[in-house]
Image: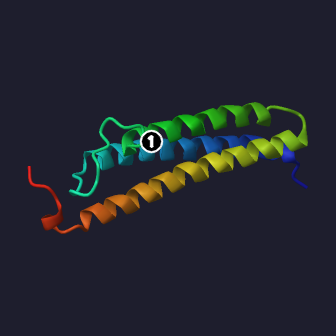
Amino acid sequence: MMLLEDLVLPVFITGLFFIIVLSILAILVGKTLQKMPNNENEISKMDSWTGPERSSYIATIAVWLLFIVSSILLASDDKVLIILGIGLILFGVLILATASILAFAVMQRKNSLTPQFLPTT
């Protein structure tokens, strides 16, 4: 029977891999989405905290902080704290995956707009 302590290193390495990949993806998609043209009904969010680029940076920093806390929890000997650390890693991966998927959906929606709705510059 596999003990809980035997799962710590594989979960840590797998979580680290997914968080690195999804962090890069979320930041790149946020930057791309920030550069896409807006239609006339959207307010430009270039210098706003709610713009896609800054939101992706904030989400990425929050997930990395969660990962640091979860790695401290995984280093403990208590089984409850190890389970909590595994849950936090999974939570961070799901946050970044959701952010990337939603940004891709918004990009697809903006790409599907007809040229008559886009401003001409």
Left/right of residue 16 with respect to residue 105 in the rendered view: right
Q: Is residue 120 left or right of residue 73?
A: left
Residue picked out by circle 1: 55
User: Residue 85, image x and y in percent?
Assistant: 76, 41
Q: Is residue 64 left or right of residue 120?
A: right
Q: What residue appears at the point 49 percent right and 37 percent down from the top-left corner?
A: 58
Asked which colour scheme the image uses, the reply is: rainbow
At 53% from the left and 54% from the top, the residue drawn is 97
- Residue 12, image quadrant: top right
Q: Residue at horizontal 37%, vertical 43%?
A: 51
**Which residue is rendered at x = 30% and y = 45% of the image?**
34
For numbered disc 1, what is the local secondary structure? helix
Name the one closer to the observer, 101 or 72.
101
**In the figure, residue 15 lies in which quadrant?**
top right
Residue 2 percent coordinates (x, y): 87, 52
Task: Judge left or right: residue 25 versus residue 74.
Answer: left
- Circle 1 residues within 10 Å: few <14, some 14–19, many ≥20: some
Q: Amino acid at mark 1?
A: Ser
Nearest the viewer among 87 and 1 is: 87
Which image quarter holds the N terminus? bottom right
Q: Nearer the viewer, residue 79 or 2?
A: 79
The percent coordinates of residue 63 (x first, y second) are 59, 39
As drawn, 104 above or below 46: below
Give the tally of numbered discs.
1
